Amino acid sequence: MLNLSISTVSRALKDHPDISESTKQKIRELAGVLEYEPNTYAINLRTNDSREFGVIVPSVANYFYQSFISSLEEEARLYGYSLLILQSGDDPLVEQENLRKCRQNRVAGVFVSITSTTANYEPFMKLGEKDIPVVFFDKVPSYEACNKVCVGDTSAANLAAEALIVRKKKRVLAVFGDIGMSITQKRIEAFTESFKSNNSNAVLQIEYAKSFTEAARTIETAFAQTQKPDAVFCMSDEILTGVMKSVQKLQLKVPHDLGIIAISDGFIPQLYYPEITYTETSGFKLAKLAFTRMLTCLSGNPFVQELRLDSILINGGSL
């Protein structure tokens, strides 16, 4: 329409210095009239330089992951990237399908929190072979040779245990998640070790809950027994919400009838009165660390690394 070559139009739209300002102006005006938009996928295919990251999480409804994604998007936008957000539903088959979508979209890198039953890490490793870095976060594989960015599982569990010991709790019910996950194993080890190293006389009852419903059932079962707990430790926000549902159902008074402490991102504890005491595992902060690690990978650094965030104790009124 302007009697110009394709290469001239292309360079003008990229503000190339070889094209005069008058020509650029004419091209921009016509592009606006035609509502022209460059084909991003075609550009990525030609240049092999994607400006999109894949993010795979078990569920976007989880507040921790919402916080992580929001923070990650802020960082990505500052560097000219966007996010392709996918959820696995905690299903390893869906997770593999999501990885395939990331490959098809030629993403620049992938951030992933694996499912509780992920056992095959070869597809993740193949992405690395194709120069698509993978940064595992939160729920990470036990496999060593990969980039991991985790919350301070050990420090968070230690702080929670010490808070219970200081308050001289005698019968502690500790509710953990899926025992097959490395995050659960690390938190159990640190939590129980704290009681041993402090020579606590408290009786520990360890239970596992893979869901909100199972966590709620654990409390009802515990309070149907003669020896009832005087405190509950919740390994995650999901477990905390299940526990609190049963606490309210049983009309237990917190902290008079039952002390409660959790490992949390910080939002859920604020929904209750009194607010729940928790050790912080921030999705917001974790995303900043994960993005920094991804940029390092994209810069050509071949070394894998495991990074951790330290936790802090936030006192509510639940102990």
Image (spheres, rainbow, N blue to C red):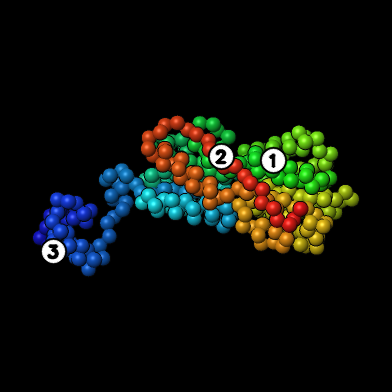
Secondary element at image label 1: helix
User: Residue at (14%, 50%) from the top-left corner?
Assistant: 18
Dots 2 and 1: beta carbons under 8 Å?
no
Q: CA distance from mark 1 to mark 3?
A: 70 Å
Q: Quadrant of the N terminus?
A: bottom left
Residue ID for mark 1: 158
117 over 251 or under it: above or below? above
Q: Residues within 10 Å of mark 2 (few under 14, many from 20)?
A: some
User: Residue at (73%, 42%) from the top-left corner?
Assistant: 162
User: 122 or 29: which is nearer to us?
Assistant: 29
Q: Of label 2 and label 3, which has the lower sequence position?
A: 3
Q: Residues within 10 Å of mark 3 (few under 14, many from 20)?
A: few
Residue 195 picture location, percent across and down: 77, 38
Residue 239 picture location, percent across and down: 68, 52
Q: Residues within 10 Å of mark 1 (few under 14, many from 20)?
A: many
Q: Quadrant location of residue 258?
A: bottom right
User: 114 or 273: which is nearer to us?
Assistant: 273
Residue ID for mark 2: 308
Secondary element at image label 3: loop
Nearer the observer: mark 2 or 3; the answer is 2
User: Residue at (61%, 57%) from the top-left corner?
Assistant: 267
Amino acid type, callout 3: Met
Q: Residue furthest bottom?
A: 33
Q: CA distance from mark 2 to mark 3?
A: 57 Å
User: Residue at (78%, 58%) from the top-left corner?
Assistant: 254
Mark number displayed over residue 1: 3
Amino acid type, callout 1: Asn
